[in-house]
Amino acid sequence: MMDRQRLGVNIDHVATIRNARGGMYPDPVRAALMAEIAGADGITAHLREDRRHIRDEDIEALVAALTIPLNFEMASTSEMQEIALRFRPHAICIVPEKREERTTEGGLEVANDKNRLSDFIKPLLDLGCRVSLFVEPDERQLEASAEIGATVVELHTGAYCDYHAEGSNRFALDELARISRCSVFANNLGLEVHAGHGLTFENVSPIAAIPQVRELNIGHFLIGESVFVGLDNAISQMRRLMVEARL
């Protein structure tokens, strides 16, 4: 049996539901605490520049309430850097962000932005935060991530998940092979490998089975599934599939 793989639960879309009506309910902090009880190893929250779901006060409340690590997703802007330096989350994941997108559409461009990103993450690393870069499974981006001092990369699994959902099995297998190859490549560079985006009960097992992938971050599907089965049951089922994939 391989080492236990961590599960990070993204609670952004609890806040999306709250914000649809305004007010205080449902509370993403309550969801985070429930996820912790259900077996999540960490909580992910993305503070977007437009505050479309998670808000500043949510980050403050999460930092105060959680006893498991908070993975703070953010764009590489001076505003977000200031917030991260103030709250000092356990982990920070730098993601690309466009205001018009519904969700993160791809990986960060590291190779062509090394100098700026290196300067951007240095104070975060100096603070002791685990800094992750959300990137495509691409050797060039992985090499650049290691060169600028990132400690973790999170591989974007969106293309694999899209092909899987479309029934494009050959393309899904090609993408899975690319993720697997890049997981080995990143690990050999000394980077800790995480993966996420679009993962569901139906497609998670092949990703979870990759030995070098130490953590999966899953949100939208788990929050959606919790409408039908409850958050604790959704997390428990995902955890079971992850464990079985690594037997």
Image: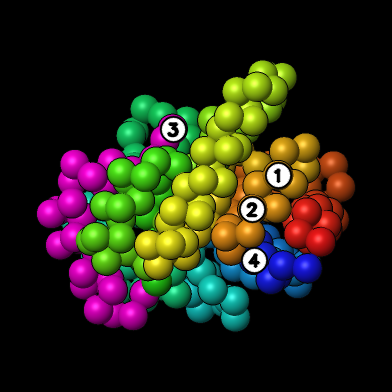
Which dot, 4 or 2, sits closer to the camera? 2
Question: CA separation, marks 2 and 1?
Answer: 7 Å
Between the residue at mark 3 and the residue at mark 4, the CA separation in whole angstroms equals 24 Å
Q: How far is disc 3 from disc 1 in space, using C-alphas? A: 22 Å
Identity of the amino acid at label 2? Ile
Q: Is residue 71 magenta?
A: no
Q: Residues within 10 Å of mark 1 (few under 14, many from 20)?
A: some
Element under label 1?
A: helix
Q: Earlier in the sequence, mark 3 or mark 4?
A: 4
Q: Please determine whether, in this image, residue 27 is positioned above or below residue 60.
A: above
Residue denoted by label 2: 210
**In the image, residue 107 lies in the stretch drawn in magenta:** yes
In this image, 174 relative to 141: left or right?
Answer: right
Q: As displayed, is residue 151 above or below residue 185?
A: below
The label shown at residue 97 is none
> Which quadrant: the C terminus?
bottom right
Residue closer to the observer: 42 or 60: 42
C-beta proximity under 8 Å, tags 2 and 1? yes
Magenta range is: 105-129
Q: How is the image coloured?
A: rainbow
**Could you say where residue 50 lies in the image, as x and y percent from the top left?**
35, 42
